[in-house]
Image: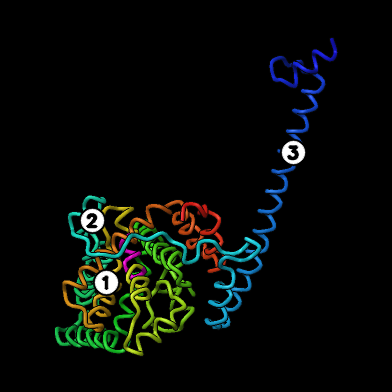
């Protein structure tokens, strides 16, 4: 009987399992799974620590103004042999570059007329209110201090002189500082929109392989950091390679594609969130000027912009979670390295 039972088991026709053996098997299986999970968790923890240390080093290089060293560090972390580097830098999946029609963009839910000619309604309203307040103040001052028409004229001319100096010397920096500060203070929508706009620039640059160098959300913050009214709030990049190509008069297609998408990333982000864009007119003007300086015809420029619009919006849609978390980090004033860590932590490598 023993021999027959053993033979039957070997032939696969009859099985007799001891409950004790099954319990031991299940226990061993659970132990293997638990050990695998522990090993995976430990590996992820080690990777996070390694990345955190390297990104802290990156922040230090950027703080010192060592752009080349910072970019070299990030590139060394691409495809790191231990698998603990930066997986998302320059790894975005992009659409093929060709001539796209407006109908093709509309099929992808994109209406370019809603964001390629942005008008800042928030700041426009604030400026009109300030103009009205100034007019009322002038009338009130005339009666309160019994000012003559000539005195009122001199005051008006003095203010116009200050405004002119601002436009010529600071490119409207004083005006922008005043409006932007009031906007961030009184309008939650304006404050939120600016943050989302800059998060769009930041994440698109990073995913396309351009390293963000610094960012500011308000004009007051920019004035404090840069000490200049001529510098507007926004995101700056490690762009010495791009500038070298510009100065040589020959810009590669790859470099132009990167910066076309980065320039449109802010308005594209606003469009995805609100259905239209208010900020970013300066970005579009700069891109248009760049294409003209490179000798692009209107047809060729339109083709470049349409491809960049489609490519940028599809990337932003695919990585919405990472962009939203990045906006929170930027709102909290996190360092560039910390913001990069947020992106890396919220994008699965398989989704790139």
Q: Nearer the viewer, residue 218 or 274?
A: 274
Image coords of residue 19 (percent x, y)? 79, 18
Compare residues 244 and 161 and report the one nearer the observer.
Answer: 244
Near mark 2 (Cα within 10 A), the count class, few <14, some 14-19 or many ≥20, is some
Assess whether residue 134 is covered by the magenta stretch: no
> Label 3 crowding class (10 Å Cα cut-off): few <14, some 14-19, many 20+?
few
Q: Give coordinates of residue 137: x percent, y percent.
A: 24, 72
* Mark 2 or 1: the one toward you: 2
Tell me which label, 3 or 1, sits earlier in the chain. 3
Above or below for 67 versus 99: below
- Residue 40 to residue 228: above or below: above
SS at mark 3? helix
**Horizontal relation, residue 150 to residue 27: left or right:** left
Q: Are marks 2 and 1 in contact (CB under 8 Å)?
A: no
Mark number displayed over residue 251: none
Q: Is residue 241 visible?
A: yes
Q: Residue 242's x, y, as percent?
A: 40, 81
Region in magenta: 262-268
Q: Mark 2 or mark 1, which has the lower sequence index?
A: 2
> Residue 284, labelled with which disc?
1
Count of numbered marks: 3
107 above or below 134? above
Residue denoted by label 2 = 105
Decide which of tag 2 and tag 3 comes sooner along the chain. Answer: 3
Q: Which residue is mark 3?
A: 32
- Secondary structure state at the residue bearing disc 1: helix
Q: Quadrant of the N terminus?
A: top right
């Amino acid at each position: 009987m023993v021999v027959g039972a053993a033979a039957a088991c070997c032939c696969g026709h009859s099985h007799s399992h001891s409950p004790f053996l099954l319990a031991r098997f299940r226990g061993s299986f659970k132990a293997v799974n638990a050990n695998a999970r522990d090993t995976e968790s430990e590996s992820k923890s080690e990777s996070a620590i390694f990345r955190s240390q390297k990104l802290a080093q990156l922040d230090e290089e950027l703080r010192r103004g060592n752009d080349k060293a910072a970019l070299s560090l990030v590139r060394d972390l691409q495809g790191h042999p231990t698998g603990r580097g930066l997986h998302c830098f320059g790894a975005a999946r992009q659409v093929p570059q060709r001539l796209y029609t407006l109908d093709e963009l509309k099929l992808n839910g994109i209406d370019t007329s809603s964001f390629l000619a942005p008008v800042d309604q928030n700041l426009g309203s604030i400026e009109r209110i300030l103009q009205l307040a100034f007019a009322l103040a002038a009338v009130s001052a005339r009666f309160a201090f019994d000012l003559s028409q000539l005195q009122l004229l001199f005051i008006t001319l003095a203010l116009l002189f200050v405004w002119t100096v601002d436009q010529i010397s600071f490119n409207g920096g004083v005006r922008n500082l005043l409006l932007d500060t009031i906007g961030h203070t009184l309008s939650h929508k304006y404050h939120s929109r600016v943050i989302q706009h800059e998060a769009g620039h930041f994440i698109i640059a990073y995913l396309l392989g351009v390293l963000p160098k610094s960012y500011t959300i308000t004009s007051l913050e920019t004035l404090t950091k840069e000490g200049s009214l001529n510098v507007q709030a926004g995101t700056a990049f490690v762009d010495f390679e791009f500038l070298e190509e510009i100065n040589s008069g020959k810009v590669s297609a790859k470099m132009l594609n990167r910066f076309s998408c980065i320039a449109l990333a802010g308005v594209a982000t606003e469009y995805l969130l609100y259905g239209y864009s208010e900020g970013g007119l300066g970005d579009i003007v700069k891109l248009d000027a760049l294409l003209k300086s490179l000798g692009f015809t209107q047809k060729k420029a339109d083709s470049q912009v349409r491809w960049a619009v489609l490519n940028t919006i599809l990337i932003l849609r695919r990585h919405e979670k990472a962009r939203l978390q990045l906006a929170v980090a930027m709102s909290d004033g996190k360092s560039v390295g910390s913001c990069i860590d947020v992106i890396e932590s919220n994008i699965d490598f398989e989704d790139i």
